[in-house]
Image (cartoon, rainbow, N blue to C red):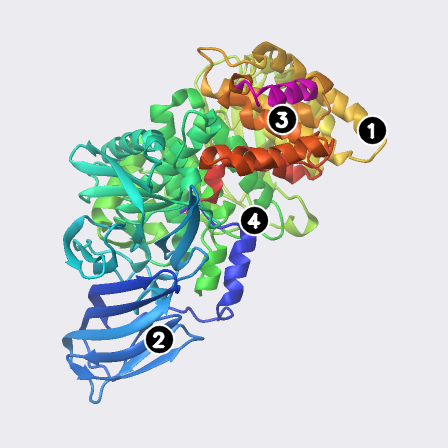
Amino acid sequence: MKFRPFLLALALAAMAPAAQAQRAWFENGPTPLRYEISVTPNVDAATFTGENTITIQTDAPLTTVTMNALDLTVQRASIDNAAVQAEVNAEAQTLTLTPRRPLAAGRHTIRIAYSGKIYDDAYGLFRVEYQDGSQTKRAIATQFEPGDARRFAPMWDQPNRRAVFSLTVTAPSDQLAVGNMPIARTQRLSGNRSRTTFADTPSMPSYLLFLAVGDFERVMRNVNGVELGVVMRRGEGHRATDALDAGEQSLNYYAEYFGAPYPLPKLDMIGVPGAGGFGAMENWGAILYFDQYLLVDENSSVAERQNVFGFVAHEIAHQWFGDLVTMNWWDDLWLNEGFASWMAAKATERWHPDWHPWMAQLTDGTATAMSLDAREGTHPIVQEINTIDDANLAFDSITYEKGLAVIRMLEAYVGEEDFRTGVRNYINAHRYGNARTEDLWAAVQAASGQPVLEIAHSFTGQPGFPLLTAKRRPGCRGTTDVTISQRRFAMDEASRTNERWSIPVVTSHVSGGEPVRTLLEPNGNGAVSMACGAYLLNAGQSGFFRVKYDTANFNLLTQRFGELESVDQLGLLLDYYAFGRSGDASFTNYLDLVNVLPDDADPVIVMDTAASMSAFAGFTHDRPSAEAVRAYGRRVLEPYFARVGWQPRPGDDANLTNMRANLITTLGGLGDEAVIAEARRRVRASQTDPSALPSEIRNATRSVYAANATEEDFNALLTQARAETEFVEARAPLAAAGKRAGPNAGASHSADDARQRHRVKSVRK
């Protein structure tokens, strides 16, 4: 799942009971085996009625049966056809059934008739409203992670209480109903209503249950016997091609990687209109998306198409890692999300290597996680979760992006083949069941023979990450030792604490040769013997740590910067920018690197440098040095923009195309008069000549135009947005209008705004 932003999580947390010291879960009691849930929604009234038949197994006699329920009203309940007393505890979010006499050990059948709410926010069973021409329409869908299935039906709503689900919905006959499994049967009723029953699911946790009903259409293709579909509002089917392509590529890659075919007969990707504070949710066989993250067309930018692939690849990875094998409890949420994020990057590398996904991840994900992890408010990857409130707050960059980075570091340490063998063994050992973090690391350690558990525990069990300081003895002749010391990297005094890590370090010489692999122990310094000349720690940038070099080696790396691999150039820039922010080094060190950027620098590096220039402009906003800093940023970036120009060219790769758009936005924000004037000309010309704004630069150009718009220009953008009937076309001018913030709009007033620029992928579940 792409996570909910922090403020939304706080809002949701405020709706539920305060966190308790004791874990709010069912550790003992009966085991649910099967749910048969039948619901009848009344979308206009925002209510529904339901019946739930639950088969349970108990190994001991029971005087009461307690399960989860929230915002449900129970009309009647029985166990084994005998009426029982039903008591709802709203604070504990439970329903307790009390039979007249204790239940004997064995199997029993519970039946509950109830009613519930349809919400206007994206949790439980919720509704969305949208315009179809002049007609207002509504659709409904479900969102249950982490603990909102209890709003849909009484059940044991926690990850390790897997069960089979049978789902039936009664809805208008002219609407399409979608569930986790294919439709088993449909019965026509009076009043233009139909009762649709889906095939039984495999055993699965409650949070993966799904239902959607609306005026939808489905486009499909067969992928090795799996029916892959995209479901969306009627009339939008032509926008589903990219999602289908990404889905097919992801299914094929993951079946190969995991050594196991996709386990269900169909996989639908459902795009509902609107926004819900997250991008997508990995319900088994029926992935929920908000349609802006799933549907694109000829007017969409390259970045938007890349986002679709990232969303789809992440959610489909969950179909194995999270759905087929599920975390035992929310403590190990990162095991789902970090792993799915890592697998999505691997799928991108497989199918779109020209996107340089690992470099993009360093700037758009890892750097963000490091910035948060270097501050007082961070937390370990594996953290104690006691309540659903706690779980809601765990959907953050530490869980996703740091989790991804640690997995990548361990794969690089043990080797790709051994790591995959460990993952396959883990999947096979726990399929259709639950697992903990230690289970994965133990499987990888057994497959590789390396101390994986030791490394993993030090990076997942404590907050923060290391700063390695590398020093070589002066007067090198031939070879000499490079000593390596560690401490926690910190952006504030409260974070300068004494954690230590077991750190896999890859050291290489700029002139070539085999890299040297070292495991730095937490209880002392390390050393590696290197030839004289420039050397690199963290070669390949797979380690989740920063490296500060002695002055002599830094100067050598600066002199030979153009000889480094692009990923190592980026790593140096990211480290020394961070050191400027933390005070571990002067910003002049970072600028020394910027000043030797190659003319043909990788587009990812150019875009990261553009973010830095915006950040510097933000630092100096309203200060005497502001214009000098902005002018410096323009001087650094204008040569790269001059080489790509305004007009997209045949053969431009995706990252070059993104760089063009990025530089338009950044240079406009830095006050480049030529860019501002051309943006104004193109937007005005596009009103009669759409070719003046190719899709690749449309959003960027409009944002510069809007940031520098007159009142008349601004109103024209709003008028254009209101006149559009196509939802993709309507969003673009609205987004541009929303960015209107005066002449300094492109220069962030916050360093973190500029540097921690999440791609859209960072708001998924």
Marks 1, 3: nearer the viewer: 3
Instruction: Please indicate whether residue 609 sits to the left or right of residue 459 in the image.
Output: right
Identify residue for label 4: 499
Question: Could you give the CA–CA distance between mark 2 and mark 4, rounded to whole angstroms?
Answer: 50 Å
Secondary structure category for the residue under label 2:
strand
Q: Which residues are magenta?
A: 675-689
Q: Which residue is tagged 3?
A: 665
Which badge, 1 or 2, comes first in the chain's sequence? 2
First in sequence: mark 2 or mark 3? Answer: 2
Q: Nearer the viewer, residue 652 or 159?
A: 652
Q: Quadrant of residue 249?
A: top left
Q: Which mark is residue 625?
A: 1
At x 44%, y 27%, the residue is 357
Tell me the kind of residue under disc 2: Thr
- Name the front one of labels 3 and 4: 3
Give the mark count.
4
Q: Residue at x 31, y 62 (%)?
A: 41
Q: Residue at x 65, y 26 (%)?
A: 666
- The nearer-to-camera label among 2 and 3 is 2
The image's mark for residue 312 is none
